[in-house]
Image: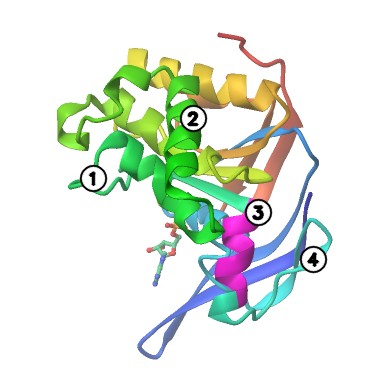
Amino acid sequence: MIRIKNLHKSYEIGSNSLHVLKGIDFNVSEGELVAIMGSSGSGKSTLLNIIGMLDNYDNGSYELDNILIKDLDETKAANYRNKFLGFVFQSFNLINYKSAVENVILPLYYQGIKRREREKIALEYLDNVGLKNWASHLPSELSGGQKQRVAIARAMVSKPKVLLADEPTGALDSKTSTEVMSLIQEINNSGKTILVVTHEEDIAKMCKRVVRLKDGVIVDDKKINQKVL
Ligand code: ADP
Ligand code: MG
């Protein structure tokens, strides 16, 4: 599903260059649930953003579903993103003036689906994350865990091949984190490929494989016995 070879990425800051990813080799097969770990600044988000086509890389190669992702123009990148990828972020990134169901509907606007059908699909996905009765509520009326579940429903509604989550539990207490991870496990058990960036060992244990980044390289990459919730 994901094939990354000798990937390099630097950021140019003024006349300085910061070499963040220094030769990453990383493959992910369909159906995996992978935790990407590493201390703050180790390049986790940079790697996830490259995989999510939100950022470019300098050298090496990245293939997603056998398509080389390199120097795509913005239209093509947006197209592939909508087709292949779902995103979940620490800060939820919901639109504050739209209700839960309207947030989940958003990705469907670009797919030429009729209004009633869009609403029906979005409600179904909200139901899948246990929030059917919260459909008309604004994000400000939801708890952190509920907001993240809306964000997960929004990410899933366009049926992505891969779900990318950057610190999805970073803003949640430990009980709520476990609930969100339980939902992520459930989605993975239905066959979805999922990558979760986290710096918490407890969260990584709920995945099936743990990859550790340090100073821009992968220092450890192991399948683990998943803690089932
Ligand atoms: P992590 O997610 O593991 O905390 P990041 O991938 O966000 O790490 O960042 C890795 C390094 O790259 C950090 O030193 C960070 O300051 C730097 N960095 C990240 N994004 C940018 C950017 N857009 N421009 C310049 N430097 C950046
Ligand atoms: Mg980060």
Report the amino acid beneath label 2: Tyr
In the figure, residue 212 lies in which quadrant? top right
Q: CA distance from mark 2 to mark 4?
A: 28 Å
Q: CA distance from mark 2 to mark 3?
A: 18 Å
Q: Please, which colouring scheme is shown?
A: rainbow
Residue 159 vertical placement versus 46 (above, below)? above
Q: Nearer the viewer, mark 2 or mark 3?
A: 2
Q: Nearer the viewer, mark 4 or mark 1?
A: 1
Residue 195 part of the magenta-drawn span = no
Decide which of tag 4 and tag 3 comes sooner along the chain: 4
Q: Is mark 2 within 8 Å of ligand 2?
A: no
Give the residue number, with chain letter if any, for mark 4. Answer: 67
Residue pictured at 39% horizontal, 91% vertical: 15
Decide which of tag 2 and tag 3 comes sooner along the chain: 3
Q: CA distance from mark 4 to mark 3?
A: 11 Å
Residue 133 vertical placement versus 16 (above, below)? above
Give the residue number, with chain letter if any, for mark 1. Answer: 98
Give the residue number, with chain letter if any, for mark 3. Answer: 84
Q: Secondary structure at mark 2?
A: helix
- Residues drawn in magenta: 76-84
Report the amino acid beneath label 3: Phe
Decide which of tag 1 and tag 2 comes sooner along the chain: 1
Q: Nearer the viewer, residue 19 or 98?
A: 98
Give the residue number, with chain letter if any, for mark 2. Answer: 125
- Residue 2 in view, yes or no: yes
Q: Which secondary structure type mostly characterizes the magenta part of the structure?
A: helix
In the figure, residue 56 lies in which quadrant? bottom right
Q: Quadrant of ligand 1?
A: bottom left
Q: Nearer the viewer, mark 3 or mark 1?
A: 1
Q: Is mark 4 within 8 Å of ligand 1?
A: no
